[in-house]
Image (tube, coloured by chain):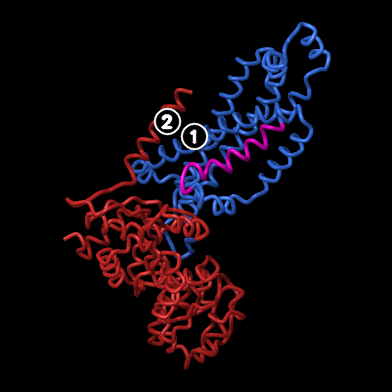
Chain colours: A blue, B red
Amino acid sequence: MEQGPFLAYVDPWINWDWLSTHISLVLGALGEHIELTAIALGAGLLIAVPLGVAAHRSAGLRLAALGFFGAFYTIPSLALFALLIPFTHLGGTTAEIPLIGYNVSILVRNVLVGLDAVPRDVLDAADGMGYRPLPRLLRVELPLALPSIFAGLRVATVSTIGIVTITALIGLGGLGSLIDKGLVENFHTPLVVAMILSVALALTADLLVVMAQRVAVPWARPV
Amino acid sequence: MWLIAALAVVATMVAACGGTTGGGTTNKGTIIVGGFKFPESSILAQIYGEALAHDAYTVTYKLNLGTREVVAPALKNGDIDLYPGYAATDLEYWNNKAGEATGDAAATTAKLNSHLQSQGLVALNPSPAVDQNAFAVTKETQQKYNLSKLSDLAPIGNQLVLGAGPECPTRPYCLPGLQTTYGIHFKDFKALDTDGPATRAAFKNGTIQVGLVFSSDGDLNSLGLVVLQDDKHLEAADNVLPILRQKVATDEVKNLLNKIDAALTTADLVDMNSQESIQHKDPDAIAKAYLEKHNYFS
């Protein structure tokens, strides 16, 4: 619905009347955006860390995991939604599967890179001190891989906040639903509000991850 | 983190407050109304939904669901029970683009139902309201030549210029159809867009007198454009009609929705679309006002 040259009405960047009567819509979209992002990141980490550890130990699994999630990243989300709906129905599960998959493909690489980069002599020293495999993993290898994992988490966080908007295809989308509304109606206010909020959200979330990293890995400076 | 948790709680509360509306005294069951991701679809879904809610059904909405690639599987597996469809476009979706749609709304709907039957679905009666390709003229042109339907253009076409998308000269519904079905031979053709900024600018500066638009575009009135009636049914019949699961399609539901569809006109669509696209009213408010105006709540 483009507004043609016939229309004298000029759409302001922010229509305060509309905004003041649609605060709950905007907050709802923001809350949905945060919820979808948080679940996608949490579940992504829960899958990527054990998968990365296992893939670090087995060359075959490394090839399979990187290949599978690399290919997963290339599936268009609309196609994925259409394939999933008959099984997982409309709603959160269908929305999260692509988001989690995209996160795992980013995070599993960083877990692997972090574990690969643990120096051989550190492992030898740990073995020499009598660490069994599991304590060595938890107390030596993973802590040393944390800076790389956090670097991946920062990329995943910011990219998820952007990618969440695709779930607007199945009626969710968080701030993406506002962006769609603005585009469909050629209406600036929801577009501008969604843009400001998603930039603010990305910056806030990035800051939170950096602060978490300072606490968890005080010896390494975030880049 | 407490901030995120608090916002998540707010979101859940907002989500819980929206959605469901019950009505009446005895509950007749739940109907989930879906809709595509464009304003007209949300408005139509709300019209069906609010009328059903008034009739004591519990109605839940799942709106703004992308395209038919999302909506159709959701209807088949029961994530939604009903969506506002369009006879010709839905026929060509459910028959895998077999090219069966015609300008005859009744025949197109019958064909559509022959494909829906085995899926456990049913399309109700096509409304007179259509959202399809249409040819418009400015009010001045309309008055000057006293035009109301496309056939009126046949004797005077050679004085007028047609504007449409660049594909128009090769598409049967466009220039070739106007020539063979209506015998209109324009003075010239300008390759522009379909109902976009280029077409609007060309109308305004007089480069074209006839242009391709969408029949239910909410901007038509404010643009001073009049759609000419497709009296020989050149365009595939995209009449509004609800498509629903046979499970919820009781006689009572069918009668109610058929009654709404029978009263709905393309002018109503234009008016309601403009309330959303120009005044930015919400679909539920637009639908409610429509139903009140037509005394469905009395």
**Amino acid on which the number 1 mark rests in the picture:** Ile
Task: Choose top left, top right, bottom left or bottom right for residue B248.
Answer: bottom left
Q: State the residue at coordinates (75%, 34%).
A: A62
Q: State the residue at coordinates (53%, 72%).
A: B202
**Amino acid on which the number 2 mark rests in the picture:** Leu
Which mark identifies residue B7?
Answer: 2
Q: Chain of mark 2?
A: B
**Quadrant including the C terminus of chain B:** bottom left
- Specify whether A177 is left or right of A44: left
Q: Is residue A98 magenta?
A: yes
In the rendered image, residue A58, in percent from the top left (x then y), is placed at 77, 30
Q: Which residue is mark 1?
A: A34
Q: Is residue B269 magenta?
A: no
Mark 2 element type = helix
Q: Are marks 2 and 1 in contact (CB under 8 Å)?
A: yes
Start and end of the magenta stretch?
A: A89-109
Local crowd at mark 1 within 10 Å, few (<14), some, or many (≥20)? many
- Dominant secondary structure of the magenta stretch? helix
Question: In this view of the protein, which residue sits in the foreground, B169 or A170?
Answer: A170
